[in-house]
Amino acid sequence: MALSPPPIIVLVRPQLGQNIGKAARAMLNFGLTEMRLVAPRDGWPNPDAGPSASGADIVLEQAQVFATVQEAIADCSLVYASTVRRRDLVTPVCSPEAMAEAITASPERAAILFGPERSGLETEDVALAGAIVTVPINPSFGSLNLAQAVILLAYEWSKRSELAVPPAKELEPPAPQGELEGLVQQLEQALDFKGYYHPPERTDVTKNTLRTIFTKPGWSSREVKAVRGVIRALLGPARNRSKP
């Protein structure tokens, strides 16, 4: 479970409202709601963003606009620049997994920077980050759109958040050994009645194999009763079924 606030998604000079909306949709899919926009080309709010967000209105409604990257990340201690391009900077490079681990292990605020759709982050933008996060990608076709890049990193973070915890479900207690033994004996008797054990010299081996199968999984009492009911039904006379 995440130990820190969810990371902030910072879109640096985004160009199209549709792409901002798609990025918002990607964010909300994985539990992220805080979006910051740095100098969006067409201003904000953008009427084209809403339809593309497909219901992720809360992200768009709460989005904040900043004039510079410095202002957008001023309250963040961990800053990652998402880029697949090499830069002439001595900046640590990490994988999405390493980024997510660092964010969830720290109580500090974190931000992930994403650049414009056409050109990506500028060198000056990357220089403001503490690390570059790079997605393993085909070197001969390193083209991700904005929403794809957001969804990949948001998903990696979500695997370590409360979203990754399955809903609580009360497990049934395992059946007592006596109930399992009753099931095994009933099965052996039914199979013997049907002439299953053949050749006779293999009977003990076959019984041991079946015993292992039916005692290994950790059946609950309810499951044992269900299987025994199936065996009784197979041995008994067929029920008369009314015709439709």
Image (spheres, rainbow, N blue to C red):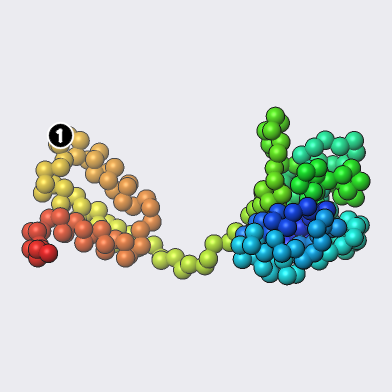
Asked where in the image residue 229 lies, by quadrant, the reply is bottom left
- Position of residue 242 relative to residue 194, above or below, is below
| Left or right: 207, with 156 as reference point | left
The amino acid on which the numbered mark 1 sits, given as a three-letter code, is Pro
Counting other residues with Cα less than 10 Å from the Cα at mark 1, is it few (<14), some (14-19), or many (20 or more)? few
Which is nearer the eye, 44 or 64? 44
Q: Residue at x 53, y 66 (%)?
A: 167
Q: Residue at x 76, y 58 (%)?
A: 9
Q: Secondary structure at mark 1?
A: loop
**Quadrant assignment for the N terminus:** bottom right
Percent position of residue 27, x then y = 68, 59
The residue beneath circle 1 is 199
Q: Residue at x 16, y 59 (%)?
A: 232
Which is nearer the eye, 237 or 89? 89
Percent position of residue 145, x then y = 70, 46
Percent position of residue 188, x then y = 19, 50
Can residue 107 be seen at all in this image of the molecule?
Answer: no
- Position of residue 63 relative to residue 214, above or below, is below
Percent position of residue 45, x then y = 77, 66
**Quadrant assignment for the C terminus:** bottom left
| Left or right: 225, with 233 as reference point | right
Q: Residue at x 11, y 46 (%)?
A: 194
Which is nearer the eye, 172 or 163? 163
Can residue 231 be seen at all in this image of the molecule?
Answer: yes
Asked where in the image residue 18 lies, by quadrant, the reply is bottom right
| Figure disc tally | 1
